[in-house]
Amino acid sequence: MMKWLAIPFLVLTLALSACSSNTSEQNEEDQKTDPSDGNTTETGGESGQSDDPLAPLEETAKVVIAEDGSASGAGFYIAKEKGYFEDYNIEVEFATFGNSDEMLPAVAAGEVDVAGGISSASFFNSIAQGIDVRFIADKGHNIKGNSYFSFVLRKDLQDEIKDYKDLKGKKVAVSTKNAVDDYIFQQMLEHAGLTRDDVEFVLMSDFGNMMASLGNKQIDAALQIEPLIAQGITNDIHVRFGDATDFAPKAQIAMVLGSPKFLTERRDVATRFMAAYLKGVRDYNDAFVKETGTKDEIIDIMTKHTATKDPEVWKNIGVVGLDPNGEMFIDDIKKQYQFYKENGAISSELDFEKVIDTSLAEEVVEIIGEYE
């Protein structure tokens, strides 16, 4: 009799055990899919898996970049060609504008997500007067000892002019007034112990005309840019005259600009965009600064996207400096603004606490690590 009573008891025990097992499995499944659980592993939201801060976006996001084929856009070009944007499910589109006066309102309105800005009084004035953009990363500075934006001297004068102070009484061409060119020229004068009255300032907006004027001996020196520096040396027109980092070692020449809408309303896209951009910049530094990367591949990308189409030229020029962590020379940006203001070229106050936003680059570097 006890044997027959034991059978239904055993069946009941097995049934209860099965129920308990099913409940446990269901609880584990619920933990995986419960969005309130910090250990969520299912894909969620536009940004993909929540345990990976840089997981590819679930839906393709389009990002518009205002870029004109300048060498300082290297990070954008490399990231596009090497598929770094695509890795995050980002599609980039390059838009060209005639000038910054057209570009800045488009960035402020969110019609353009990212752009490049070159320091000038008019640039700062536009922002101070209500054009809402942010400086978010480095897009151009000089590399110590091999500046891409530096002074050149007529070759026949190299025995006569050996130091910056020897420019006294000479004609020096500069492409703009109250812009970063003018600022670097001023830094050189102060370094040399000269004033503007000591040197004949020649305003010459076209860099190509500078080289021709040097060749014709109409000017004595010029603040020139690559690849024209290298071309003039090859053609025996001019020689490098010192290096801009001698007197302006931390001059911020250009900045990556971000639309406030892009940085706030589309933060998940902006974060991944910045990660891809910095990966491109790091490949650029590996190739041109460390010379440890695939230089030929990077040169091919640069010839595709810029006006310098000869690969051999890229092997000899001073390239644009691009910080692999996105860091800008913030103190120098403020110093340039003050220079323009003292010249009477700035009409409004600029709130740098609002305008300069390094949080995006810092957030990304925290995830991908600092460049070594």
Image (tube, rainbow, N blue to C red):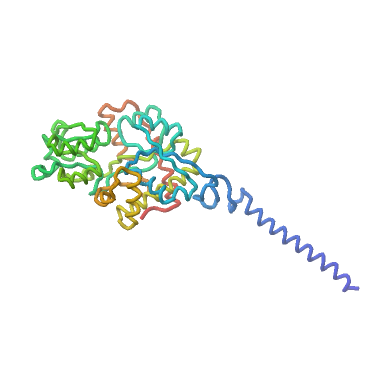
- Can you give x and y, in whole percent of width and height, for residue 122 in the image? 32, 29
- Left or right: 99 with respect to 12? left
Residue ID at (21%, 46%): 230
Q: Quadrant of residue 191?
A: top left
Q: How many marks?
A: 0
- Can you give x and y, in whole percent of width and height, for residue 255 in the image? 35, 40
Q: Which quarter of the image is occupied by the N terminus? A: bottom right
Foreground residue among 124 and 94? 94
Q: Which quarter of the image is occupied by the C terminus? A: bottom left
Residue ID at (45%, 34%): 111
Foreground residue among 25 and 206? 206
Q: In this view, which residue lies farthest toward the right?
A: 1
Residue ID at (78%, 66%): 14
- Can you give x and y, in whole percent of width and height, for residue 245 in the image? 23, 45
Q: In this view, which residue lies farthest toward the left?
A: 160
Q: Quadrant of residue 132?
A: top left
- Left or right: 148 with respect to 155? right
Foreground residue among 106 and 315? 315
- Can you give x and y, in whole percent of width and height, for residue 34 in the image? 63, 50
Q: Note whether 50 is above or below 260 in the view shown.
A: below
Q: Note whether 171 is above or below 237 in the view shown.
A: above
